[in-house]
Amino acid sequence: MTWSETHRRWRAMQEIETLVNASASGELPWNDEYAALFGDRDGLLAALRYRWELSVSAQLDTHLSEDALADQRRRLLERNSGVLRLIRRTPVPA
């Protein structure tokens, strides 16, 4: 994957996360650009799951105090509430 493709993919992920987190419907956004970048909806959901796992591992530093860790976890969950609802209600393909 070229730098340009990687940049397009990460920009699309940010856009999708913003849309999903702001939406009450909980629907997965989909268009031709997303299809070209992620293949299909399952590919997009897999990318969202992966990005969530990266966010958790990068932002929840176990060296923080218990209170600071709880506060950081709360903020992370709030910022990603729509994404979490979406990936939790969608089973992982076998």
Image: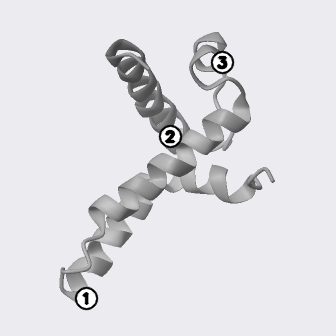
Seen in the image, is 28 located left or right of residue 58? Answer: right
* Residue at which label 2 appears: 22
Q: Position of residue 18 (x, y in %)?
A: 45, 36
Q: Give neighbour class at mark 3: few <14, some 14-19, many 20+ (Cα, 10 Å).
A: few
Q: Amino acid at mark 1?
A: Glu
The residue tagged with tag 1: helix, strand or loop?
helix
Of badges 1 and 2, nearer the viewer stands: 1
Q: Residues within 10 Å of mark 2 (few under 14, many from 20)?
A: some
Label 2 or label 3, whichever lies nearer to me, is: 3
Instruction: Check disc 3 and report the residue beneath it.
Output: 35
Q: Amino acid at mark 2?
A: Ala
Name the element at disc 2. Answer: helix
Q: Could you say where residue 6 lies in the image, as x and y percent from the top left? A: 39, 23
Q: Residue at x 51, y 31 (%)?
A: 16
Q: Nearer the viewer, residue 7 or 27?
A: 7
Identify the mark at residue 20; answer none if there is no mark: none
Residue 34 in sight here = yes
